[in-house]
Amino acid sequence: MKYELFSVLANRVHEVEEEKSFLSKKVRTLEAANAKLTAQVKRLQVAMSAAVKGPQTNPAVVPAATTLLVLILSLALVVLPTMQQGGKKMPPMNGMVGTFDDPNPNTSIAGNFITIH
């Protein structure tokens, strides 16, 4: 009777030790996966915070690009109307009279401003 009880208990201890070993391996596997996922979450948080803040640009490059863009736009605004009119003087728009359109050369300085008729 004691021998049978001892044998049953020994088998039970062996089963519990095998289950403990299996569960320990599973815990290590899950801890490794958790560490990888935590690292991925941190990288994603950094990427998201960078996306919310906007792209980081070099401040020395932006003014040069802006200056070039303004120069090209200004040149286009001067050259394109001249090319479309063939170099001719454009008539005043919608009845607007400007400084050079005033037929009276003795007009005072105050009369040299653009007026709408």
Image (cartoon, grey):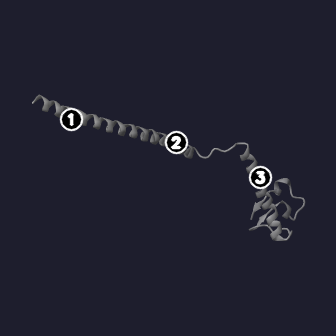
Would you say the residues marked 2 and 3 are in contact, meaning their CB atoms lie under 8 Å apart?
A: no
On residue 68, the disc is 3
Give the Cα separation between the discs numbered 1 and 2: 48 Å
Question: Looking at the image, which residue sits at the far right?
Answer: 105
- Quadrant position of residue 90: bottom right
Q: Residues within 10 Å of mark 1 (few under 14, many from 20)?
A: few
Amino acid type for the residue under numbered disc 2? Arg
Observer able to see residue 98: yes
Q: Secondary structure at mark 2?
A: helix
Observer able to see residue 90: no
Q: Residue 33 in the image: x percent, y percent?
A: 43, 41
On residue 55, the disc is none
Foreground mark, 1 or 2, reads 1
Amino acid type for the residue under numbered disc 1? Asn
Residue that numbered label 1 is attached to:
11
Q: Quadrant of the C terminus?
A: bottom right
First in sequence: mark 3 or mark 1? 1
| Number of marks drawn | 3
First in sequence: mark 1 or mark 2? 1
Q: Residue at x 51, y 44 (%)?
A: 44
Residue that numbered label 2 is attached to:
43
Q: Residue 32 in the image: x percent, y percent?
A: 43, 39
Question: Looking at the image, which residue sits at the far left?
Answer: 1
Task: Say which of 8 and 25 sits in front.
Answer: 8
Task: Say which of 35 and 74 sits in front.
Answer: 35
Q: Residue at x 13, y 30 (%)?
A: 3
Q: Residue 96 in the image: x percent, y percent?
A: 76, 64
Asked whether, in this view, residue 103 is left or right of residue 74, the answer is: right
- Quadrant position of residue 29: top left
Q: Residues within 10 Å of mark 3 (few under 14, many from 20)?
A: few
Would you say the residues marked 3 and 1 are in contact, meaning their CB atoms lie under 8 Å apart?
A: no
